[in-house]
Image (tube, rainbow, N blue to C red):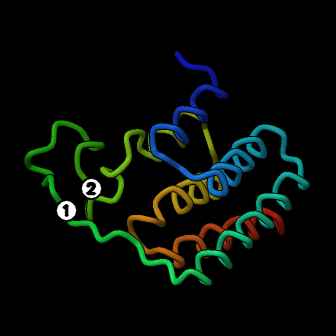
Amino acid sequence: MLGRFKKIQNFIRLNHIEPAEAEVIKGITLYSTTKEREVLEKADELLDKLIKEREAEGFTPISTKEVTTQKEAKSALDYQVGGNHYHQMAYQPLSFIMELGLNFCEGNIVKYVSRYKYKNGLQDLKKAQHYLKFLLEF
């Protein structure tokens, strides 16, 4: 079984996650083990900067369509309801989140940061930031 650090590296590499997004994901996975507030604050700053950059460039997500139905699927990971944005990724966020044992908020941050290019764009980044701010307040 791969170690935690290797799983994080693979998730980022296999899904072609850009450096700014990767730093947010690394921060959340680090926070999940250390619970250091400074790590969350840094991730919040990075996410805020990423949102502003994407807004300035008029970012639009890649449109996706559902390609596999539940009847054709061999596993729950083989299909999804409401699109195929996770099938654009080699290493699905759900598997990554479960393998690292991330909590609900941490998992949602990873999910939204890794899928925003394929689904809801800036709205997903803002949802990730909302969960991050909740962790800061909690």
Residue reaching furthest to the front = 57
Residue at image mark 1? 66
Q: Nearer the viewer, residue 56 or 123?
A: 56
Q: Residue at x 45, y 38 (%)?
A: 14
Residue reaching furthest to the left = 71
Distance CA(mark 2)–CA(mark 1): 7 Å
Neighbour class for label 1 at 10 Å: few (<14), some, many (≥20)? few
Q: Nearer the viewer, residue 70 or 44?
A: 44
Residue 93 location (% of width, % of height): 47, 47
Above or below residue 40? Residue 54 is: below
Picture mark count: 2
Residue reaching furthest to the top = 1
Amino acid found under the numbered disc labelled 2: Gln
Residue 132 location (% of width, % of height): 72, 65
Q: Nearer the viewer, residue 43 or 104?
A: 43
Which type of secondary structure does the marked residue at label 1 adopt?
Answer: loop
Amino acid found under the numbered disc labelled 1: Glu
Find residue 80 and name its label.
2
Q: Quadrant of residue 135?
A: bottom right
Q: Residue at x 56, y 60 (%)?
A: 113
Task: Tell me whether circle 2 and circle 1 mark residues in contact (CB < 8 Å).
Answer: yes
